[in-house]
Amino acid sequence: MARKCQECGSERIRVDYAKGEAVCMDCGLIVSEEEMFDSGKEWRSFDQGDEDSARGGSPMKYTKLNKGLVTMIDRRGTDLRGNKLSSKGRAQMYRLIKWHKRASVSSSMQRNLSIALTEMRRVASYLNIPETLVEAAALLYRKTVKKGLIRGRLIEAVVAAVLYTVCRTYHVPRTLNEMAEASGLTKKEIGRTYRFLVRELNLDVPLTNPIHYIPRFASELNLSGEVQEEGRRILEDAIKKGLISGRGPTGVAAAAVYIAGLLKGERRTQKEVANVAGVTEVTIRNRYRELKKRLNIDVAA
């Protein structure tokens, strides 16, 4: 029903929900509207992905089985006033809870997601992966399941591959060795699954920049900010001269940190650096010699 101005009868009414007013465009009267309400959101969103969500409830979370849109049945065995239910009422409540759980994972896809999302949260917690990246990984896993790419593959391998893909996409340094340690699988299995997903989903995953590993390695070795800056400068020079092509990013980054520590008087042994970077001492020694020779770095090992 169209609003009308009580003063002039005009139907040209402009509604300002921010001010809670309805104003007549002809005479300027503020029209009284008792049933006017704001149809906008009831919660503030700081996530661009939730801009289209309407009223009520919290933002959707892809890390939850039903994206957070699920009914929870309390198991305390009390009514609304806090009084204990009778034995018959409790038995009925437990039956409702049981069937509610069965209905929430009724299909094979839901059962798969239930296992995978639990495993994803466990691995992400072990590797300290930010929550925003876990959300992105959960969304990517759902796309993988929807396209039927999970069939015939280990759920744990796909979860690790998805997390590794997201970490590389958002420049969060996590290696295949770390993924293998957290998931209990081999590096080869995760790498094979990762390449399969990238190919089948046409993902544009950027190359790993060894500079992203510098702050992490330096922090774990208790090195100063000066060492980090020196390591970054060494790698920037190496990238300009094309010295990292065909080399593992973790090995190059570890060698740069090792050299920077020597230059700044904060010496760490090759074994210490190797343990932090997850590479062998031989790798660090080879990368160290290459960088020292090609960049003309004057440092004594």
Image (tube, rainbow, N blue to C red):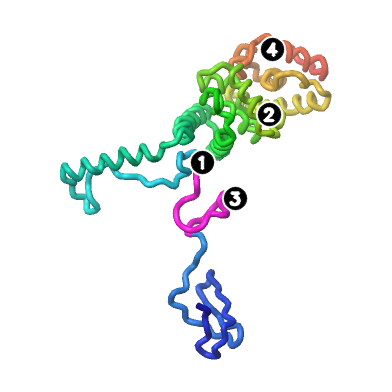
Residue depth check, mark 3 versus mark 4: number of the one nearer the observer: 3
The residue wearing badge 3 is 48
Q: CA distance from mark 3 to mark 4?
A: 43 Å
Q: Position of residue 266 (x, y in %)?
A: 65, 20
Mark closer to the chain start, 3 or 2: 3
The residue wearing badge 4 is 283
Residue span colored magenta: 42-62
Residue depth check, mark 4 versus mark 2: number of the one nearer the observer: 2
**Dot 3 amino acid type:** Gln
Q: CA distance from mark 2 to mark 1?
A: 23 Å
Q: CA distance from mark 3 to mark 2?
A: 28 Å
> Secondary structure beneath disc 1?
loop
Question: Is residue 125 among what the camera can see?
Answer: no
> Secondary structure beneath disc 4?
helix
**Dot 2 amino acid type:** Arg
Q: CA distance from mark 4 to mark 1?
A: 40 Å
**Dot 4 amino acid type:** Thr
Q: Position of residue 173 (x, y in %)?
A: 62, 28
Answer few, some or many: residues within 10 Å of disc 2's Cα (few below 14, many 20 plus, some between 14 and 19).
Answer: few
Q: Position of residue 159 (x, y in %)?
A: 54, 28
The residue wearing badge 2 is 199
Q: Residue at x 57, y 23 (%)?
A: 220
The majority secondary structure of the magenta stretch comes to loop
Answer few, some or many: residues within 10 Å of disc 1's Cα (few below 14, many 20 plus, some between 14 and 19).
Answer: some
**Side of 166 relative to 82 (left or right):** right
Residue 57 included in the magenta stretch of the image:
yes
Q: CA distance from mark 1 to mark 3?
A: 14 Å
The residue wearing badge 1 is 62
